[in-house]
Amino acid sequence: MKKYIFLLLLLFLALSPFIALADETTLISFSGNVEVKISKDKDWIPVTERVEILEGGAVKTGVDGAAVLLFPNKSKVWLKESSNLEIELRQLSSNKLSLSQGDVKVRIPHLSRKETFEVKTRTVVCAARGTEYTLSTTESGDSNTWALFGEITVEFMQKAMKPIKISQGHSFTVDEIGEKVKVALLTKEEEIKGLENWDPGLTSEEKQKELKEKEKDRKQIRDLSSDVASNEDAVKDIVIKVKESDFEAGRTLKDIHGNLVRVDQRLMRPDEKSLQFFNLVKRPEYRYTAPTTYAFAYNGPSTVSNRLDLFQANISFNSVIPDRIEDWPGFFSDAKPDKASLVSANRTDASNIFVIAKIFKYDSTEDKLVNDIRVIKDAAADSKEVLITGKTNFIGLDRILRVDISDGGANDGTTNISGIYWASKVEACRGCTDHFEIKGDPSFYNYRADPYRLGNNSTKDIIWNATEEYIINNSGGIRQVTDFTSTSSDPFSILKNAAAENIMYVKKSISNDPNLWTSNDAVRNDISNADFLNMNTNIDIVFIPDLAVAIIQRALPALNEVSLK
């Protein structure tokens, strides 16, 4: 059981053993005149390259300077020109910074309840988790903060004044003696100034570019959830929920067809007993090109604008997941899962979401998650693997993700979700084969199709779950074995130029007769070009290893201590 649960963890981590854990704060980027004190007893020195800063160290920027600090818990602090920031305390669960003058932007991930991250000036202390805000101060002590995301707790150096909370979209100012306090809504100009890209060395136009892209992303997300906007509970559970991400990563590259692709990944804890991973793939324009002669038939439009594809994995447990990710490996070695879902989807519009999914429920007798007919029919006792597919809207998608789906009772593969069907794996006859497969060598590609029968009813149609898998580089080219075995590049550089692409279809069977599947070629000939339910599209997901790398940076030391026995 320990090994099985650990393998489920790898679904989220995609474990890579090459990345080491950083222990100190690192100045990762700078421009102009920037100086650092490596530690409290060191002298100021000019910055010429990335540098680690210990507890007691400090950073100051000149009139043309800017810098970015990265902390081990993935918090980031940007310094603008003429700023002076000291790292007063740097411990595993506590970070305390002191800003004596200047402007900083602070981005803090979703910390555990025991972790703290504070930035103080002469008049106030700002504390937050899962938050982004700016903080400015003068040498005399006037302080100003803008809450861009989340909520900030502000404590006053004058202990007589009670702490106050500043919510997202508000500003807070206090004078040098900490008496004149003002809270107001952020103006549009302040919001833009705070949200723009603070990375060093950017022009004014470059600072605004990312903000414009984020606004476009927000519009896409609003469009995705528009049909359930009136249902608050449904919206909260829908896959595109980004406000509480524990880890996030993204990359822009080309897919195997040559299309420009943006991949965004997030690993979240939507509640104390669950993990949620999603991989959102956005293409301004999608044009399909068959990568090889083995590819399955694509029946969609020649060009699709603003295409969105998604993979999401959910898993819930019978006990509370630890706040600290370093404690996860030990937790997973003993925990028992409750249910899980693996869902791939393509959105044509808000009411037409093409879904291919597998769902799992915990079986106490076997002490494991199962994906057989018991997940769709509680009273059934059949070990055949189950596939969920069809077209639905966001409410239906949300129900599949929550494993809130069952047989419709008509014995034809329909379910209690309109437009969604279930099918069970078909067993091949003696001397026959139960799937089609072509593997690339030395190129990294794999074509496979597995047969399923609607509703586990021998009188119903067979459908083929057809999949194309590729390992590609950032230019969309198929990687070769030698790209990984005959290189002097470090593993991290290799991973930065590698991605996986998974193209999925549900095809009709021409014969509906497993007795004809006597060879790999015979099986391929049974896979129709026509799509089940006339879907006329595919699901085309690009995966990147970036999120797994970020997680391993935190979890590797603890993973080394976990037994897989």
Image (tube, helix red, strand yellow):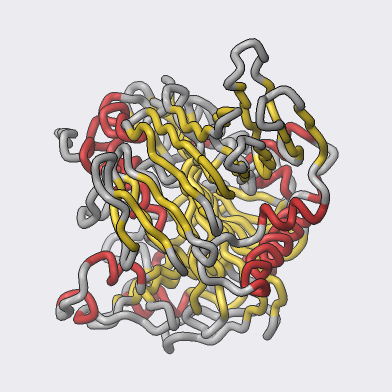
> Which residue reaches farthest front?
140
- Percent of width and height locating residue 197: 60, 62
Number of labelled discs? 0
Q: Indicate the quadrant where residue 238 lies.
A: top right
Q: Which residue is rendered at x = 38% and y = 45% of the image?
A: 71
Q: Foreground: 533 or 500?
A: 500
- Percent of width and height locating residue 213: 67, 66
- Residue 512 seen in the current view: no
> Which residue reaches farthest top?
160
Q: Which residue is rendered at x = 61% and y = 35% of the image?
A: 141
The N terminus, quarter of image? top left
Q: In this view, does 127 lie above or below 514?
A: above
- Percent of width and height locating residue 279: 52, 56
Q: Indicate the quadrant where residue 485 lies.
A: bottom left
Q: Foreground: 518 or 378?
A: 378
The C terminus, quarter of image? top left
- Residue 498 seen in the current view: yes
Q: Foreground: 186 or 542?
A: 186
Q: Is residue 162 above or below residue 333?
A: above
Q: Is residue 287 above or below residue 37?
A: below
Left or right: residue 291 compared with residue 555: right
Q: Which residue is rendered at x = 32% and y = 75% of the image?
A: 519
> Which residue reaches farthest right?
230
Q: Foreground: 212 or 513?
A: 212
Q: Indicate the quadrant where residue 562 lies.
A: top left
Q: Which residue is rendered at x = 31% and y = 80% of the image?
A: 479
- Percent of width and height locating residue 179: 72, 22
Left or right: residue 381 compared with residue 6: right
